[in-house]
Image: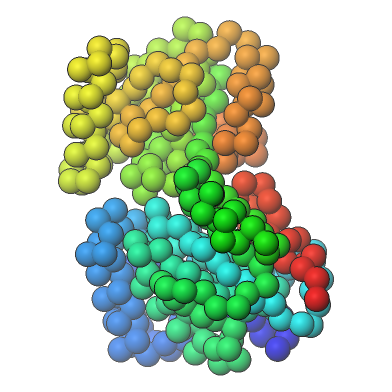
């Protein structure tokens, strides 16, 4: 099977994902599926929240749209042309997380685009959306049927592993899959660096980096680095438009719980009734809470980022990642900075 055919299949899938992400009505067969098939996908989207309370329709559509926007010919061709792969297909196990919708899609794309077989062990929290899209992809490229496996149980024979999970699951990965060529990912989070001259619009954009997917992703900002003297009122005013998030029961329960626990332990908190701010140099913060600390010079910023580099996914507020861009990675913006396509390229016979 030629790589061009796989690219064309993903391009068609991208058009479908964007239509679903934008909540468009079916108009014609240009998106590759019939009206009935499109409506079936809409049902899958609507049911996600029944399997996982964090997977609201809005968040699922957001993930579909952001992912689909990368699946265009020019982007896929430019990206994949940097690598060369052997003709022999390998079976690559993808141990997928379930923290945000379609979090394992990029690995799925990499494995298939490199000519390999994707053996996907799905999270129980996200076990129906990717298979539904996979069925569409097979419809577009029938030859891929032999290269796509979805399971929530045991994995068969494999040649390599890409596993994403928590720090605790890393021990499991090493015990069961350490003998294979592998990429193991663990806990990461993202930070924002302020210089003090941010506009209200930039701080509002940062709210997207913080609150998208309720803050559950590794690309969500959980820590702010602020120049000494920065008025926190500016931050609260900038993100106020995200206040509706508190009406989600699961998020609201986390907010109430963390507020109660930290106040009982006499921690000082700032509160605007939908997110808590706590001054701390700790990188990770509980859901519904943001940590922050002040710095006096750029050296302090550089030292903090260097100290925590193995736990930071994205640094927003930089030229590379402006405020609001954390949840919109490019195809070559690999998780943990590990080039998945290069890893697949180097798999030996």
Residue 295, percent across and down?
55, 12
Q: Is residue 269 above or below residue 331?
A: above
Which residue is nearer to you in this view: 50 or 297? 50
Which residue is nearer to you in this view: 291 or 8? 291
Residue 67, percent across and down?
50, 62
Which residue is nearer to you in this view: 301 or 153? 153
Q: Is residue 170 left or right of residue 309?
A: left
Residue at left offset 50%, top offset 43%: 167
Q: Quadrant of the C terminus?
A: bottom right
Residue 328 in sight from this viewpoint: no
Residue 227 in sight from this viewpoint: yes
Q: Is residue 158 above or below residue 218?
A: below
Q: How is this picture coloured?
A: rainbow
Q: Is residue 92 left or right of residue 278?
A: right
Residue at left offset 60%, top offset 29%: 308
Residue 314, percent across and down?
57, 39
Residue 184, percent across and down?
60, 53
Q: Is residue 302 above or below residue 58?
A: above
Which residue is nearer to you in this view: 164 or 85? 164
Q: Is residue 283 above or below residue 170?
A: above
Q: Quadrant of the N terminus?
A: bottom right
Residue at left offset 45%, top offset 12%: 230
Residue at left offset 25%, top offset 12%: 266
Residue 205, image quadrant: top left
């Amino acid at each position: 099977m030629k790589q061009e055919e796989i690219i064309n299949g993903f391009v068609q899938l991208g058009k479908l994902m964007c239509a679903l992400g934008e909540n468009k009505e079916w108009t014609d067969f240009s998106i590759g599926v019939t009206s009935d098939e499109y409506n079936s996908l809409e049902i899958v989207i609507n049911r996600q929240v029944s399997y996982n309370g964090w997977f609201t329709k809005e968040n699922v559509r957001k993930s579909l749209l952001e992912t689909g926007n990368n699946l265009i010919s020019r982007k896929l061709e430019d990206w994949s042309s940097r690598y060369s792969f052997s003709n022999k297909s390998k079976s690559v196990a993808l141990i997928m997380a379930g923290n945000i919708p379609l979090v394992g899609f990029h690995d799925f794309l990499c494995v298939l685009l490199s000519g390999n077989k994707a053996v996907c062990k799905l999270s129980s929290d996200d076990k129906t959306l990717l298979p539904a899209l996979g069925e569409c992809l097979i419809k577009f490229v029938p030859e891929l049927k032999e290269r796509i496996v979805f399971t929530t149980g045991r994995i068969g024979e494999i040649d390599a592993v890409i596993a994403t999970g928590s720090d605790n699951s890393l021990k499991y990965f090493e015990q069961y899959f350490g003998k294979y060529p592998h990429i193991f990912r663990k806990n990461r989070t993202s930070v924002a660096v302020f210089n003090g001259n941010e506009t209200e619009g930039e701080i509002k954009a940062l709210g997207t980096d913080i609150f998208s997917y309720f803050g559950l992703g590794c690309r969500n900002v959980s820590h702010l680095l602020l120049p000494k003297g920065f008025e926190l009122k500016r931050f609260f005013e900038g993100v106020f438009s995200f206040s509706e998030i508190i009406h989600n029961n699961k998020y609201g329960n986390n907010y109430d719980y963390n507020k109660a626990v930290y106040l009982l332990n006499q921690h000082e908190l700032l509160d605007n009734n939908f997110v808590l701010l706590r001054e701390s140099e700790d990188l990770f913060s509980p859901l519904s809470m943001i940590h922050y600390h002040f710095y006096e010079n750029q050296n302090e910023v550089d030292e903090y980022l260097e100290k925590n580099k193995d736990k930071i996914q994205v640094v927003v507020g930089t030229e590379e990642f402006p405020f609001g861009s954390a949840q919109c990675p490019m195809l070559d913006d690999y998780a943990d900075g590990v080039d998945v396509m290069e890893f697949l390229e180097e798999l030996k016979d």
